[in-house]
Amino acid sequence: MNPEIHRILKIHNSPKILTRFEEYRELVKAKAARNGAMGRRDERCIADGNELLRFNCSTFTCDLGLNGSTSICNQQYCSVCGIIKSGFSPKMDGISTLSTSWRAQMAIPEDVEEEFKFMNVKRSMLVCRVVAGRVGSEGKEINKEDGGFDSVIGSGGGSGSGAYTKLDEDELLVFNPRAVLPCFIIVYTV
Ligand SMILES: [Zn+2]
């Protein structure tokens, strides 16, 4: 069961969205520098906000990219076009980003898959730049007010004990939509 890649599109983000992303990075860097002054230095956060490359599994319903079409649509339920137009929406339980495209793909359950076919919903993988900032793990009390964490390792993988050593294999939940910048869309079927 190998996924078949149909097309890969590069996203030209508007200056407004790019600025929002860079402004968020500056906030994270500034916060890391303040924390560093108090004895908790995180060089990576101070340098670039701990930017990572992650995958986000999404869907769309229009003909984006088909026969060279590059315009985004206005359909209400077309997630990808919505994300390109105005960025990710804030989610209570965080925006899910994964380290490998394989895991991102597995994030959709099989019965949903069947419905997708029926409703002509197409799948895509968004390759995103993510300013992860300071990463915490779920289960631990997170105090956002207290200069706490900017993102959290989800409970999707690992033992859940909070002892995560291999960050790259887990789900990273990002709470601020400005922290995620989609760069490429991979359109595929399985
Ligand atoms: Zn669309």
Image (tube, rainbow, N blue to C red):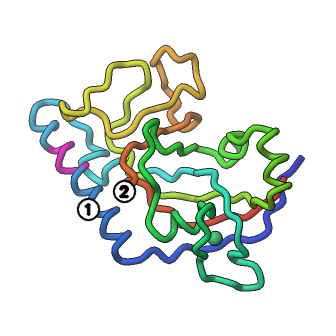
Q: Which residues are magenta?
A: 28-33
Q: Which residue is mark 2?
A: 178
The CA span between labels 1 and 2 is 9 Å
Q: Which mark is residue 123?
A: none
Q: Which residue is mark 1?
A: 23
Q: Is residue 142 magenta?
A: no
Callout 2: helix, strand or loop? helix
Disc 1 marks a residue whose amino acid type is Glu
Disc 2 marks a residue whose amino acid type is Arg
The first of marks 1 and 2 along the sequence is: 1
Who's the residue at 41% across and 49% down the image?
90
Left or right of residue 36, residue 54 in this image: right
User: In this figure, what is the number of numbered marks?
Assistant: 2
Q: Residues within 10 Å of mark 1 (few under 14, many from 20)?
A: some
Left or right of residue 79, residue 188 in this image: right
Left or right of residue 72, residue 39 in this image: left
Who's the residue at 36% across and 70% down the image?
18
Q: Against 151, is 176 above or below?
A: below
Pick out the residue farthest to the front: 76
Q: For residue 63, what is the image quadrant?
A: bottom right
User: Could you tell me residue 73's position as x and y percent?
Assistant: 60, 76
